[in-house]
Amino acid sequence: MNEVLKALQQHMTAMGLEYEFETYTGEKNPYWIGEYYGAQDSDEGGYMTHSPLLTGFAIGAKAELYDQADRARKYFQNGATMQVDDTSVACWVQAVMAIPQETEELTKIQITLKVQTWERC
């Protein structure tokens, strides 16, 4: 799990997106938070599959949030890989969707990722 969280932090930083895990404590707008819901064994090859969520929020900066979501979609669409300690981490985008809100000022977009990890032999 830690490898996935470290990789996501590094990928979001590489894209220039304001990001924190679970709770955003900064002041920038728009911003992204990550959520993690566990892993499952994929196959006999030792892969683990994870499905983290990236959720973007903007107050009055709708166009900028949509631009950032598109940047993330393009970044992950063909797979983004990195080595974290002794673990390889590969991330792909599964879905991007806008989440309707009750107020016009708040915009929320959710990106579902598929992440596979495996340790070096």
Image (spheres, rainbow, N blue to C red):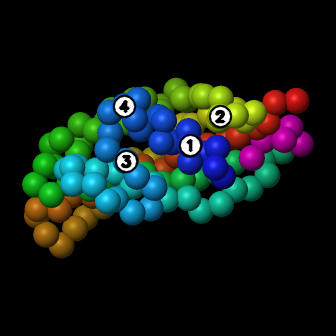
Q: Mark 4 — residue?
A: 15
Q: CA distance from mark 1 to mark 4?
A: 14 Å
Q: Amino acid at mark 2?
A: Val
- x%, y% of residue 100? 25, 64
Label 4 near label 2: C-beta < 8 Å? no
Q: Residues within 10 Å of mark 3 (few under 14, many from 20)?
A: many
Q: What residue appears at the point 75 percent right and 33 percent down from the top-left corner?
A: 86
Q: Position of residue 93 (x, y in %)?
A: 49, 40
Of the numbered discs in the image, which one, if any, rests on residue 19?
Answer: 3
The circle drawn on residue 33 is: none
Q: How many residues crowd mark 4 within 10 Å: few (<14), some (14–19), many (20+)?
A: few
Q: Kindly identify the amino acid type of the residue bearing the numbered disc 4.
A: Met
Which of labels 2 and 4 is toward the front? Answer: 2
Q: Earlier in the sequence, mark 2 or mark 1?
A: 1
Task: Name the mark nearer the viewer: 1 or 4.
Answer: 1
From the top left corner, tell me how far across and down residue 44 is, in percent.
Answer: 89, 42
Residue, disc 1: 6
Please report the residue visible at 32 percent of the width from the left and 59 percent of the height from the top.
25
In the picture of the structure, the residue carrying the numbered disc 2 is 84
